[in-house]
Amino acid sequence: MGLYTNVLLVNLSFLFQVVLQSGQFKGGIRFRVDDLQKPIENPGNINWESYARGAVYALQNSGYDLRKGIVGYISGVQGLDSSGLSSSAAVGVAYLLALENVNDLDLSPVDNIQLDKSIENKYLGLENGILDPSAILLSRYGYLTFMDCKTASPSYAYFSELSKSQQPQGQLPFKILLAFSVDPGVYEAQKCILDENLARRAEHYFSEMKRVAKGRDAWARGNLQEFGKLVSASGRSSIVNYECGSKEMIQLHEILLKAPGVLGARFSGAGFRGCCLAIVDSECAEEAAAYVRAEYEKAQPELVSKIPVDRLVLVCEPGDSARVILPDHDRHC
């Protein structure tokens, strides 16, 4: 997830206050962690303060006694608003980890996935799932995260060729996390009775499940070529079968597929705004980025003129999961 959050922790044992400033929003937040937080009834009242209060609510509602607050500053990356890279889950997880740290709570990533879901579903009244917090909390460098959303249990496939490579950490960009929920046997038995539109959507859903399993195996074998083809097949199916994507995003997707060194590409989300992602040979990354900038400017000159030059194409490196970074002396600060 691409929303970078920074929370400065202050551990004062007498301080029950949450005090926050934002790099993007005016004003500040101040409230007590021992005040009972109640769910928001009107979604129109959701603002940047809501996520901090929601984190306190989720922990309170799960039976955790909070005695210490946090003093901090939180900021996203300027120029990436509405880019499809940010996630409310990144904010919620940051608050959860900060509050847990100062209150000496030791919770697992799976616990925090459910707590973030509680922020979104119970406190804010939204219908978000567990995809975003799972990607944020379960990622491991060199591994593909394989998530079963039916059981909320993760497993990992290690990229076998990574240990043979002399490349420094972060030169093989990747991030895929997809969901499972319905028995494929039921689909095979009943798909003949679906109307045309539903049949295409079901085809995308169930073929995506197969691609996930094949992608996990390709990744484990270190076969990026096969893995990339599966990513591209996922992208094509989302456009053709699920009818995702705006004209502008589909053009960007097609340009990415032609870029030098690109092994596979698809939308980062539904494809109606935001961005596309591509897996690219690390040695060709800058060349591919230059190609995409030039070709997309030809296709969409007016749109490109509104995007900061240094934000049009980003060459990303993989990283580990969200975590609290403490000073060497391992004290709260």
Image: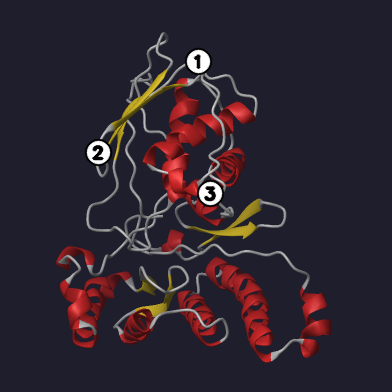
Dot 1 amino acid type: Arg
Residue 26, label in figure: 2
Check disc 1 and report the residue beneath it. 67
At a point 18% along the width and 82% down the height, the residue shown is 301
At a point 35% along the width and 74% down the height, the residue shown is 280
At a point 51% along the width and 18% down the height, the residue shown is 34
Left or right: residue 163 compared with residue 153: left
Q: Badge 2 local density, few (<14 within 10 Å), some, or many (20+)? A: few
Q: Earlier in the sequence, mark 1 or mark 2?
A: 2
- Corner quadrant of residue 165: bottom left
Question: Label 3 near label 2: C-beta < 8 Å?
Answer: no
- Regarding residue 172, the answer to whether it shows in the image is yes
Q: Earlier in the sequence, mark 2 or mark 3?
A: 2
Q: How far apart are labels 2 and 3 at the CA level?
A: 32 Å
Q: Name the residue nearer the viewer: 284 or 296.
A: 296
- Corner quadrant of residue 221: bottom right
Residue 4, placed above or below residue 66? below
| Quadrant containing the C terminus in the rendered view | top left
Q: Earlier in the sequence, mark 3 or mark 1?
A: 1
Check disc 3 and report the residue beneath it. 138
| Residue 310, percent from left and from top | 17, 64
Q: How far apart are labels 3 and 1 at the CA level?
A: 28 Å
Residue 137, label in figure: none
